[in-house]
Amino acid sequence: MQKRQILINAFMSIVQIIIISAVLFILYKFLLNTIGVEQLGIWSLVLATTSVSQIASFGLSGSVVKFVAKYIAKEDEKSVSEVIQTEPFPNVWTENALL
């Protein structure tokens, strides 16, 4: 059963890659015809910058939610404050390193 599930997952991953590639190809062709080469370049830079920001987060926002909820349940306001205040720093450092 597990081997069958792995094969299904692998096949669906391939299908997902093919569909995403086709959609992006059509999207870029549409954008190129609609907004032109210069604006497409700007759009691509903005998209790349936001993608780097998403990569840099490393899922930290989920961790912040978990620990804030945990410390609120324990009524530990100091720890809640520390988690919220320190969360942006890894993102800023990683974004600067990647850019």
Image: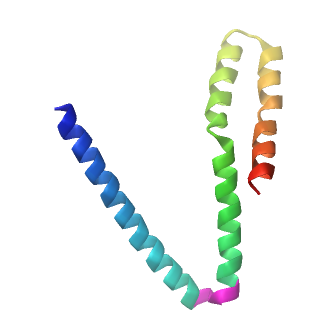
On screen, 50 above or below 34?
A: above
Q: Position of residue 3 (x, y in %)?
A: 20, 36
Image quarter of residue 91 = top right
- x 66%, y 36%: residue: 61
Type of colouring? rainbow
Q: Is residue 99 left or right of residue 28?
A: right
Pick the residue in front: 27 or 74. 27
| Quarter containing the N terminus | top left
- x 65%, y 16%: residue: 70
Residue 15 colored in magenta in the image = no
- x 64%, y 49%: residue: 55
Q: Give the magenta part as a residue range.
A: 34-38
Residue 35 colored in magenta in the image = yes
The kind of secondary structure the magenta stretch mainly shows is helix
Q: How many marks?
A: 0
- x 36%, y 58%: residue: 16
Q: Position of residue 93 (x, y in %)?
A: 81, 43
Q: Position of residue 79 (x, y in %)?
A: 79, 16
| Quarter containing the C terminus | bottom right
Furthest toward the top, the residue is: 74
Image quarter of residue 32 = bottom right
Q: Is residue 38 left or right of residue 11?
A: right
Pick the residue in front: 74 or 26. 26
On screen, 38 above or below 21?
A: below
